[in-house]
Image (spheres, rainbow, N blue to C red):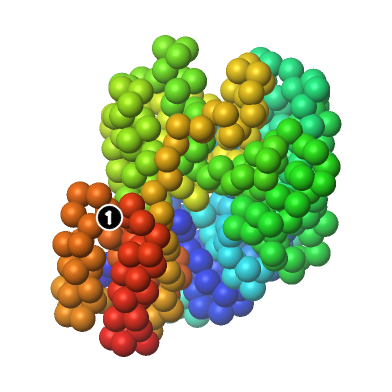
Amino acid sequence: MGKELFGTDGIRGVAGQYPLDRETVYAFGVALGHDLCKRAADAEVLIGADTRESGTWIAEVVAGGLKDCGVRARFAGVITTPGVAYLTRTGSFLAGVMISASHNPYQDNGIKVFGHSGFKLPDDEEHAIEQEIFQVAKSGAAVRIEPLTEDPSLHSQYLAYLVSTVSTSFEGMHLAIDCGHGASYQIAPELLTRLGARVTTICADPNGRNINLNCGALHLETLQAAVLEEHADFGVAFDGDADRAIFVSRAGNIINGDGVLLMSARALKAEGRLTGNVVVSTVMANLGLERALDRQGIRMVRTPVGDKYVLEEMVRLDAAIGGEQSGHVIFRQYATTGDGMLTAIRIFEIAQRAGVGLDELVSDLEIYPQKLVNVRVREKKALNELPMVAKEIKQAEDAFGPAGRVLVRFSGTEPLARVMVEGPDLERVDRFSEAIAAAIRRELT
């Protein structure tokens, strides 16, 4: 049986509904607990959450399942996903569990699992846990809820680590930050202020239901306005669990993960730290990034979408940096996962040392017009089973030749087909992306 619960980024769904109903969440806690008990008699798990109203009860149900297996849980409270990954690999925890649905709206939530290494679990271990989840859920075992008390020392440890990675003062910098009413709402302003910056903070008042709501890394308009109104030097927006960061320049221009990879790779190469002279990104990375890196003599390798796959390839190639256009960027010297705040301090450090702004640092990045269309589907089928879609894709590929790209894939976390078309002129990009999306609607909606 293939995996049915774990997607590309853990288990995700609407809080309170399968697979995030109490019975299945409890079964997850039991299954993870049994898996860990095979390796240690006295196992402890770290649990953290973002600011969604469902985060606490999901964490307490997971902890209840763990306790029924003799596994203790420590609760970090509201913390970022990369914070959980860091604390798991540097502490005594056999695993870390983050309760978050990242950039999704508040109604959704999710469960992400890290091993003691700080890496997300391999597919075969997820599959084994999933099979036991089904068995436990089928048994009708009573759900235990284990009340949790936040341990503030965990927050302090992660903050201290981030500060320790910076060797340049941010004195004189004026930063605008958008916390998306998410997990970074306390730690990001504290971090950047401690590093010497003057910080203007927006969207840092979570109420359990406003996470990612018209703010954060997917909605840059508010941050752009704040940067311009406050005359800030730089702006950065985080998503709900702060594993991604998108930047805004002093002039109000958006710099996504492609720009971050270019700036970072160049800086690492100049310092002699770009191992393998390679950058790992995904099939979504803009052709302009690939060509800009090539002009610097840097090779770019593409993977499927998902920071998990980026990291696997980074490890295989011993690459220092990799990431996604969406803002997940992994600095392997410092972290085992994308970390929005770590990305922010690396970029601000590069700019501070260079004495220039973000626009200057990416001035040679020529972005090819790229359009992404999301189509909600009732089911996911192989493209070779969709003749009308295949026909539209071929027409676009034939028209562009090597000067463009077409990518159609299904989301690993939502019932969506994602259509990406990229090419030298916007008119044809728009036309072909809409034609492919229309074909998908005819066949799958």
**Residue 172 left/right relative to 419:** right
Nearest the eye: 379 or 19: 379
- Residue in the image at 79% along x and 32% along y: 174
Place residue 108 in its image quadrant.
Answer: bottom right
Q: Position of residue 294 (x, y in %)?
A: 31, 29
Q: Residues within 10 Å of mark 1 (few under 14, many from 20)?
A: many
Q: Secondary structure at mark 1?
A: strand
Decide: is 372 above or below 224: below
Nearest the eye: 139 or 416: 416
Nearest the eye: 399 or 71: 399
Q: Position of residue 25 (x, y in %)?
A: 55, 68
**Residue flagged by tag 1: what amino acid is it?**
Arg
In the rendered image, is residue 412 in sight? no
In the rendered image, is residue 147 in sight? yes
Decide: is 62 above or below 71: below
- Residue in the image at 19% along x and 69% along y: 395
- Residue in the image at 21% along x and 81% along y: 388
* Number of numbered discs on residues: 1
**Image quadrant for the C terminus?**
bottom left
Place residue 414 in its image quadrant.
Answer: bottom left
| Residue under numbered circle 1 | 405
Q: Position of residue 83 (x, y in %)?
A: 62, 40
**Image quadrant for the N terminus?**
bottom left
Decide: is 320 above or below 85: above
Q: Position of residue 382 (x, y in %)?
A: 22, 72
Nearest the eye: 314 or 76: 314
- Residue in the image at 64% along x and 23% along y: 356
